[in-house]
Structure formats: structure tokens, C-alpha cells
Amino acid sequence: MNEIKQLVSTLKRRLKIQGMTYRDLASALGMSEASVKRMFAQGRFNLERVVEISNLLGFTLAELTHEAAIGENRLHTLSEAQEKELVGDEKLLMVAVCVLNHWEIADITRIYQFSQAECIAHLLKLDRLRLITLLPGNRIRLNVARDFDWRSQGPIRMYFLKQGLGDFLQNDFARESETLSFSHAMLTDAAAAKMLAEIRKLRQKFAELHEESLASPLPKRHGTGMFVAMREWEMPSFTKNRRTRTSTAASTD
């Protein structure tokens, strides 16, 4: 990705995070919406226009270009040690999850029992872990890639499985926005591989809808969990009734 495309991609992401549409931006810049759309589509910005848009988004030009420059080097996952540090401090983990969902300090302190000083102390720890960069004015810049995920079998995933999965499933899933389904099939290895590919697409769609929802104010967004699992499996009560190899061989003699 060249520098112009990185900059345009960063501007688009920042507009979405702040809930600013092309129409809003056009009004603020004194331009037509069509002209703004064309400017972004063609990637043609003069320096003054980039500075103006940066300021509207609450960034200096230096901060915006730095964010664009690190775009290709964002974290896709944390190290084992970094995850252990988060799991070892429940409040730090809570703040980490909040910022990964694009909450600001005011959101965190309004909803959870943190003072601003406590919240900033946790954010400084996340900055040290490179999960975020804490900017002047206590603004938060995420340093994670769009496909960021916790480590497979890592400390955080195990924490959520042990601490949260039971509570998540203890529900009748009766609301319109909820669903629970369980299916069983006999699949070949090739069919199982195809199904796993479809599950990866589903997770990607979930991430895309999360990004799309960032344009809405926080009160209109709701913490939503989606648990997807697939493995070769048989009910234990069925397994205990299987014939052993010895008994099967004896019955054929």
C-alpha cells in the first residue's frame, strides 16, 4: 500500500470511528458531498486540505501521518507474556476490552467504577504493552490490526472460556437479537475443512459489522458475544456403548 492510500485509509477509518459521514465532512469543509466523495475515491488531497481534515478529526498532521505510517505494522496478536499481564489484572483487562471497542476515557469512567486518574494509569500500562498509544489530551490511538485476535489457547482466551462461557450460555436466547443452535453431522476431512473456511468468513463478517457500527454513538451499540466452535465429537453416552476393537474382533471369529 503506497503512502497516499495509507493516508486515505486512515482518514476513512477515523471518520467512521467518530461517526462523521462524507456529508458532515462536506458541510464542515464548505464543499459538496459529491466533491468530497470524489476526493477520497481519487486520493487527491492538497496539504492544506489534509491539515484541515486532520484538525476536524482532532489530530495534528504529524499524528495522522504517523498513524498512517504504522498502519501496516499494527499488532495482529499479543505475546504470551503480554496476555498474562492483562489476565493478571482484571481492571486492566476491562479497560483493554473497552478501548479495543473504541471507547474513550469519558465512556469508561461514566459506565464503570473508575476515576479518571485510575483509567489513565491503566491506559499508560496498555501504552507500554503497545496495545495503544496515549496521545496528548488523553486521546487513544489503537495499535492493533483489523484482524487482531487473542492467542489460540492463550491466557486471555482461556480466561474467557473459564470465567465467561458458562455465564454466556446460561440464557434462553429468546430475544430477537439472540440465537442458539447446535447441529451435528458426519463430515469427511474435506467437508470439515470447507466448513472451517465458512466459519472464518463468518468471523470476518462479524468484525466488519463491528467496524460498521462504530459510526453510531455508544448508547446505540451493545456488547455482543458470538461463540463458534466445531470439532470431531460424539456424546459421551454414545461413546461408552461403542464396541471395543477386541470385542469386535471376537464377534467376527
Image: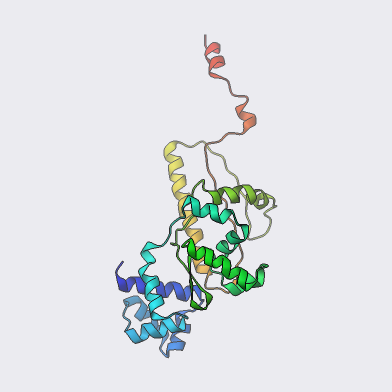
**Which percent across, then down, holds residue 204?**
47, 57
Where's the N terminus, which quadrant? bottom left
Q: How many marks?
A: 0
- What colour scheme was applied to this rendering of the protein? rainbow
* Residue 116 placement (x, y as % from top left): 62, 73
In the image, what residue occupies the spot 62% across and 68% down? 118
State the residue lying farthest toward the bottom: 30
> Which residue is at the far left?
2
Query: Residue 39, image x and y in percent?
Result: 35, 81
Q: Position of residue 68 (x, y in %)?
A: 37, 71
- Residue beneath the point at 48% across and 59% down: 205
Could one spot residue 148 in this view of the protein?
Answer: yes
Tell me if residue 111 comes above or below residue 252 in the rendering.
below
Residue at horizontal 51%, vertical 45%? 153
Instruction: Point out the residue furthest to the top here.
Output: 253
Q: Does the rendering let one see residue 219?
A: no
User: Looking at the image, which residue is at 54% across and 55% down?
Assistant: 85
For this rendering, which residue is in front, 149 or 240?
A: 149
Corner quadrant of residue 64:
bottom left
- 212 versus 85 height, above or below: below
Relative to 48, say whether 182 is above or below.
Answer: above
Q: Is residue 234 above or below residue 154?
A: above
Query: In which quadrant of the rendered view does residue 175 lie?
Result: bottom right
Residue nearest the viewer, comparing 24 with 102: 102
